[in-house]
Amino acid sequence: AQKVTQAQTEISVVEKEDVTLDCVYETRDTTYYLFWYKQPPSGELVFLIRRNSFDEQNEISGRYSWNFQKSTSSFNFTITASQVVDSAVYFCASSTGANSKLTFGKGITLSVRP
Amino acid sequence: EAGVAQSPRYKIIEKRQSVAFWCNPISGHATLYWYQQILGQGPKLLIQFQNNGVVDDSQLPKDRFSAERLKGVDSTLKIQPAKLEDSAVYLCASSVTGTLYGYTFGSGTRLTVV
């Protein structure tokens, strides 16, 4: 069974600060996929990134970057120069891909203050 | 491209009443999922369909929950009778043919059982 742990529950930062959201996963599969989703107050889940287990390259997309480390089973997400619009709940999730069910962590509530 | 459509957006019912939620996936997406998201937690899969067949319903409380996808397109999730602990957001998602590509969530139905 897969498990995703997001130990941080709430983070509050001031605008323009950098912030890192932690994600630790557990799986016995050699092939798996990791995701980050954003859930703003409106409630929909917005896809941010998908990464497969064979690709450990870090990825940067604008102010967002992801650090995937198989050695520590972590897939951390950093927002650089945070903005008020980044305020949301962020979920890390995993999937084996075999049946494509997503297993989510409990989420991290990020508040960015002006 | 139209997204995953869900209705209603909100629903308040009394315990022991019944309720139904509707989902229309993205056109061409053969796989459809229903997730339950209790406040403060990550979404949890209730049931997964591939076309009109059930792939995974291991976490569906079958004594009170039912779901169907008769023509392999839209789907209905029903709760009868509802309990207080069923208060949650019910999210529908769809993806291309059981893969992780185009995995898109709807805006959800927020159910409150009083």
Image (tube, rainbow, N blue to C red):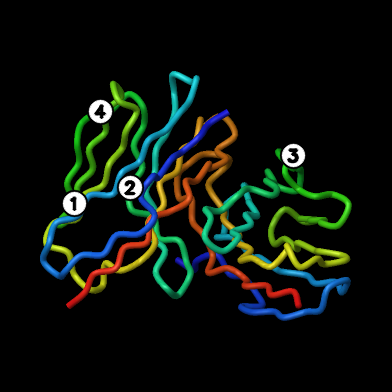
Q: Mark 4 highlights which residue?
A: A56
Coordinates of residue A99 in the picture (x, y in percent): 59, 34
- Compare marks 4 and 2 and give the one earlier in the sequence: 2
Q: Residues within 10 Å of mark 2 (few under 14, many from 20)?
A: some
Q: Look at label 4 and name its amino acid.
A: Glu
Report if the CB atoms under discs 4 and 2 are less than 8 Å apart. no
- Residues marked 4 and 1, same chain: yes
Between the residue at mark 4 and the residue at mark 3, the CA separation in whole angstroms equals: 32 Å
- Which mark is drawn over residue B58? 3
- Residue that badge 2 annotates: A49
Residue beneath the point at 39% across and 62% down: A89
Check the picture and name the quadrant holding the C terminus of chain B: bottom right
User: Could you tell me how far apart the alpha carbons at marks 4 and 1 are, in whole angstroms?
Assistant: 16 Å
Q: CA distance from mark 4 to mark 2?
A: 13 Å
Q: Residue at x 81, y 78 (%)?
A: B14
Give the labeled residue for mark 1.
Answer: A61
- Sequence-earlier tag: 2 or 1: 2
Residue B46, how many percent across, how many down?
Answer: 69, 49
Classify mark 3: residues with Cα within 10 Å, few (<14), some (14-19) or many (20+).
few
Mark 4 or mark 1: whose residue is earlier in sequence: 4
